[in-house]
Image: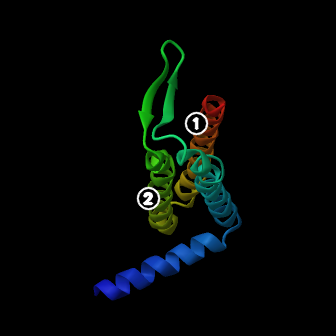
Amino acid sequence: MKFSKRVQFFFSDMLAWLRTKIGAWCFVLSLLFLSLDVALPVWRIMPLASSRPYIPLHYNIYLGVDQLGSWYQIFAVPTLGLGLFLFHLILQTIAFRKEKLLATMVAVASVLIEFILLSAMALIVLLNLSYAA
């Protein structure tokens, strides 16, 4: 089978998966969490980045802030989220052809992972706002 036919079948399977109710809801929720994961640091941290060369990236309960970095390092979490989102979308599409339950489980796991990454980003933003004062 030609490569173009395989790609065409892959995208037709992806559209079929996204037309299902659970596939559409999980896709929309994951995309919403991912977009909030990007928008939150742009909205709250980018204005602070011009006044400070380094921003806190990690907090440890025993040592306090233990990792500082440049402003662009804050986007490591959304980059990880985007990579996982695309990987899970590919995995869901492949699994949908043979095992619909597996595709559903991967979709729900994708939503949960994106929510966890959004929570981590919210805590990083709160950490930066508390040290901005």
- Across and down, in percent, residue 98 comes to 48, 65
* Distance of label 2 from label 1 (alpha carbons): 25 Å
Task: Look at the picture and state if 100 lies above or below 74.
Answer: below
- Across and down, in percent, residue 101 comes to 57, 55
Q: Residues within 10 Å of mark 2 (few under 14, many from 20)?
A: few
- Residue 124 occupies quadrant: top right
The residue tagged with tag 1: helix, strand or loop? helix
**Circle 2 residue:** 87
Q: Please state which amino acid type lies under the numbered disc 2.
A: Phe
Image quarter in which the C terminus is found: top right
Write the residue at 65% across / 74% down.
19
**What number is the disc on residue 49?**
none
Q: Please state which amino acid type lies under the numbered disc 1.
A: Ile
Write the residue at 44% across / 77% down.
10
Task: Look at the picture and state if 85 lies above or below 5.
Answer: above
**Circle 1 residue:** 124
- Across and down, in percent, residue 77 comes to 49, 46
- Across and down, in percent, residue 20 comes to 67, 69
First in sequence: mark 2 or mark 1?
A: 2
Residue 69 as seen in the image, left or right of residue 114: left
> Which mark's residue is nearer the viewer, 2 or 1?
1
- Residue 22 occupies quadrant: bottom right
Task: Look at the picture and state if 22 lies above or below 48.
Answer: below
For the view shown, which residue lies furthest in the front direction? Answer: 51
Write the residue at 47% across / 62% down.
86
Residue 64 as seen in the image, left or right of residue 8: right
